[in-house]
Image (spheres, rainbow, N blue to C red):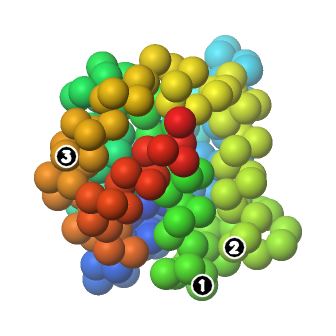
Amino acid sequence: MDALTHNIESYLSPAYHPLCDGIALEGTRIGAAALHTAVHEPNNLKARSDMMMSSMMGAIAFQKDLGAVHACAHALGAVCDLHHGLANALMIDTVLAWNYQAVPAKFDELAHVCKLSGGGTALVPWLKALKASVGIHGGLAAHGVKPEQLARLVEVATADICHQTNPRPCVAADFERLFRAAM
């Protein structure tokens, strides 16, 4: 999920870097097609190789930058000791649903490379279903995040530089809403 998040967030970033955009879209296409199989068939070398390629492409693409999903994930790792990939997976659908209105055409393109019908509005439901299909269930609370940690999570996410290139500007009140929605 982290590899897919790197590619998606890099593509959604408003920073200008057409080379990274192309790499991010291709990394998303490859990862979207391979992730479920790589998890359920760990000996499937093609699926695992495709996920490795998607991961590498995401790492190249994110020189463009990331967004609020990663700002939240970094906070969840620092405050709640959540694994980085899990933290991204727990936040991606909530943050992307909030970001949709800022860049609907980019969501359309992401849906296209993921081979989804219904355009950009299909991306978030597909991500939710993908997460469930690879065994990621429940929200933040189900993974040990406590309401009393919310203030510190908001503080750390707000201070994280990743959200500076989120397609929709974020302030502390936005992070509080996003963390609460993901609980």
Q: What residue type is labelled 3?
A: Glu
Report the number of numbered marks: 3
- Asked whether 26 or 161 is in front, the reply is 161
Q: What residue lies at 37% left-to-right and 51% top-to-bottom?
A: 176
Question: Residue 21 got which mark?
Answer: none
Q: What residue type is labelled 1?
A: Ala
Q: Is residue 94 left or right of residue 65?
A: right
Q: Look at the numbered disc 3 and give the secondary structure of its residue.
A: helix
Label 3 vs label 1: CA separation? 31 Å
Q: What residue lies at 56% left-to-right and 79% top-to-bottom?
A: 101
Q: Mark 2 points at which residue?
A: 120
Q: Which percent across, then down, holds residue 110?
A: 62, 68
Label 2 vs label 3: CA separation? 31 Å
Q: Which percent across, then down, holds residue 49?
A: 55, 33
Q: Which percent across, then down, holds residue 165?
A: 28, 70
Q: Is residue 67 left or right of residue 111?
A: left
Q: In this view, does 46 lie to the left or right of 85?
A: right
Q: Name the residue under label 3.
A: 155
Q: Can residue 79 be seen in this view?
A: yes
Mark 3 vs mark 1: which is more N-terminal? 1
Mark 2 vs mark 3: which is more N-terminal? 2
Q: Mark 1 touching mark 2, by CB under 8 A?
A: yes
Q: Name the residue under label 1.
A: 105
- Asked whether 82 or 2 is in front, the reply is 82
Q: Mark 3 touching mark 1, by CB under 8 A?
A: no
On screen, residue 182 above or below 124: above
Q: Which amino acid does label 2 sit on?
A: Gly
- Which image quadrant is residue 50 in? top right
Find the residue positioned furthest to the front. Answer: 148
Label 1 vs label 2: CA separation? 7 Å
Q: Is residue 46 visible?
A: no
